[in-house]
Image (cartoon, helix red, strand yellow):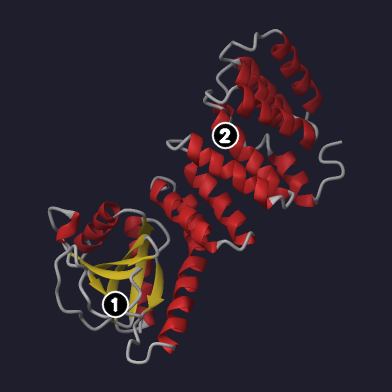
């Protein structure tokens, strides 16, 4: 019965729902036992236990949305799982289970290639629950969704937000960083196209969205001298002549605010590396180096990964 008539990925999502739900997520011992029973292969018994508890609990009880959510996790079919999750979102949107239910719904939509509904659920998650701890996980699914919708701008924006919020989860940071390489390749390709049509402006100096910020310790974010790649200083910040760009750098992080970028750059400098902050398409990319060869940069990337975590990678700069 489980996943009957579903695409393989959707069936896999349904089958793995219980396994992906940590037992500590449930606070009621009866629900913990129901999840454990389902994990042991006795799904019918688990569903019956959840239904009995649901029937005996008033909808106004704070336990009610948790019961509905657990019912979704032990559901036998995707339609049943979806109904329970939607009830959590619609009827109990103020509960601590609503953001998790929205993420599960988005995963189900993605599994069935319903990308537009997946995007709507993910945007609702970010709008209605801006402080949710699930934002990094949501960013992963949002990026995949928007890449499939051919909207890399939104995909990259989600990834930047997710990486900024996933500092304590190295595995998730690596997953987000891997996807974010598509954003870097897209930016590099766009820059190359502009270089070909601007004659002497070979570094894209007319592109306002790209700025290089030499990183150095400072009491305030704006004290870092900001340059465009072609060497034109920002009107709002201090100016200095542009230095020749090195051949290779190691990108350590891409974050959404200059303060966060400054923190990362300061850590890199504390490890003995020079650092720059490249502002590109609304993101602040922290890069260490310069390095004369790719091999030197790759060796530094491995050291930085061990020292700072994340997923550093080498970028070549003209």
Query: What's the residue at 35%, 74% (across, down)?
Result: 207
Circle 1 residues within 10 Å: few <14, some 14–19, many ≥20: many
Mark 1: secondary structure: loop
Closer to the observer: label 2 or label 1? 1
Answer left or right for 245 relative to 170: left
Q: Quadrant of the N terminus?
A: top right
For disc 2, the marked residue is 100
Mark 2: secondary structure: helix
For disc 1, the marked residue is 229
Answer left or right for 135 relative to 15: left
Name the foreground residue: 7 vs 2: 7
Circle 2 residues within 10 Å: few <14, some 14–19, many ≥20: some
122 relative to 85, above or below: below
Query: What's the residue at 79%, 51% (across, down)?
Result: 8
111 relative to 267, above or below: above
Indicate the position of residue 111 as horizontal and vertical percent values: 71, 49
119 relative to 243, above or below: above
Q: Earlier in the sequence, mark 2 or mark 1?
A: 2
């Amino acid at each position: 019965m489980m996943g009957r008539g579903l695409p393989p990925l959707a069936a896999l999502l349904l089958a793995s729902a219980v396994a992906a739900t940590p037992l500590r997520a449930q606070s009621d011992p009866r629900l913990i036992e129901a999840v454990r029973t389902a994990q042991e292969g006795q799904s019918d018994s688990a569903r019956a236990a959840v239904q009995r508890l649901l029937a005996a609990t008033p909808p106004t009880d704070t336990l009610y949305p948790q019961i509905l959510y657990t019912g979704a996790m032990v559901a036998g079919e995707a339609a049943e799982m979806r109904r329970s999750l939607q009830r959590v979102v619609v009827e109990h949107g103020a509960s601590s289970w609503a953001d998790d239910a929205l993420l599960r719904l988005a995963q189900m939509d993605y599994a069935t290639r319903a990308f537009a509904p997946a995007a709507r659920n993910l945007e609702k998650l970010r709008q209605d629950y801006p402080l949710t701890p699930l934002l990094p996980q949501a960013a992963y699914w949002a990026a995949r969704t928007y890449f499939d919708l051919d909207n890399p701008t939104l995909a990259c924006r989600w990834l930047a937000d997710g990486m900024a919020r996933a500092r304590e989860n190295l595995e998730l940071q690596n997953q987000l960083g891997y996807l974010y390489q598509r954003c870097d390749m897209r930016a590099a390709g766009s820059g190359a196209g502009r270089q070909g049509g601007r004659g002497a402006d070979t570094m894209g100096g007319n592109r306002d969205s790209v700025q290089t910020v030499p990183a150095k310790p400072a009491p305030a974010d704006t004290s870092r001298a900001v340059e465009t790649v072609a060497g034109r200083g920002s009107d709002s910040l201090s100016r200095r002549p542009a230095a020749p760009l090195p051949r290779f750098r190691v990108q350590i992080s891409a974050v959404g605010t200059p303060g966060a970028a400054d923190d990362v750059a300061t850590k890199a400098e504390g490890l003995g590396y020079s650092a720059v902050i490249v502002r590109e398409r609304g993101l602040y990319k922290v890069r260490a180096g310069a390095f004369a060869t790719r091999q030197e940069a790759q060796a530094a990337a491995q050291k930085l990964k061990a020292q700072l975590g994340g997923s550093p990678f080498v970028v070549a700069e003209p």
